[in-house]
Image: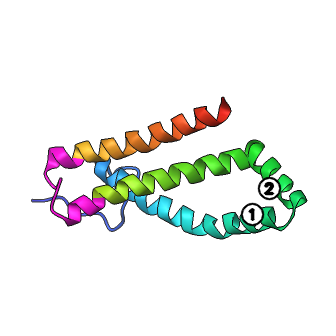
Amino acid sequence: MTPRRPYYLNLREIRLPLGGWVSILHRASGAAMALAAPLFLYAWMCSLESAEGFGAVASFFSGGLGWLIGLGFLWALLHHFFAGLRHLGFDLGWGEEKERARFTALLSLVTALGLTGLMTLGSLL
């Protein structure tokens, strides 16, 4: 006799493969960028209005919270781009095999994190 299936999804017990995490992060990064875009456009508008506005925006993004927000947006942009290329490859029929899909998932994660790290180091130096 087969065990009864649960009526709910216990997210702590589900073991997603790496590709599942990349897909979820792809959606989350897209949503984060969509929600952050108006804020960045407002900051851009303020920075273009006057020298004081530019100074205020520059000082915010060079400080702790602004720097973290910019870093998060940079990671979201890079991850969304590379995971989007991965999904585009799936749409074209490339990389659907299990090993290739696992490799491209790892590659998109490592590339986005690595480039975010390199750009962060470059901005600190």
Is most of the magenta stretch helix, strand or loop?
Answer: helix
Residue at left offset 58%, top offset 54%: 73
Place of residue 30 in the rendered image (x, y in percent of width and height, measured from the top left): 48, 64
Place of residue 103 in the rendered image (x, y in percent of width and height, measured from the top left): 24, 42
The residue indicated by pointer 2 is: 57
In this rendering, position of residue 8 left or right of residue 98: right
In this rendering, position of residue 111 left or right of residue 29: left
Q: Are marks 1 and 2 in contact (CB under 8 Å)?
A: yes
Q: Quadrant of the N terminus?
A: bottom left
Residue at left offset 82%, top offset 48%: 59
The residue indicated by pointer 1 is: 43
Vertically, is 116 above or below 4?
Answer: above
Badge count: 2
In this rendering, position of residue 69 left or right of residue 46: left
Q: CA distance from mark 1 to mark 2?
A: 6 Å
Between 125 and 10, the one lying in front of the other is 125
The stretch of residues the image draws in magenta is 87-101
Instruction: Please state which amino acid type lies under the numbered disc 2.
Output: Val
The answer to whether any part of residue 25 appears in the image is no
Place of residue 12 in the rendered image (x, y in percent of width and height, measured from the top left): 41, 50
Is residue 98 inside the magenta stretch? yes
Helix, strand or loop for disc 2: helix
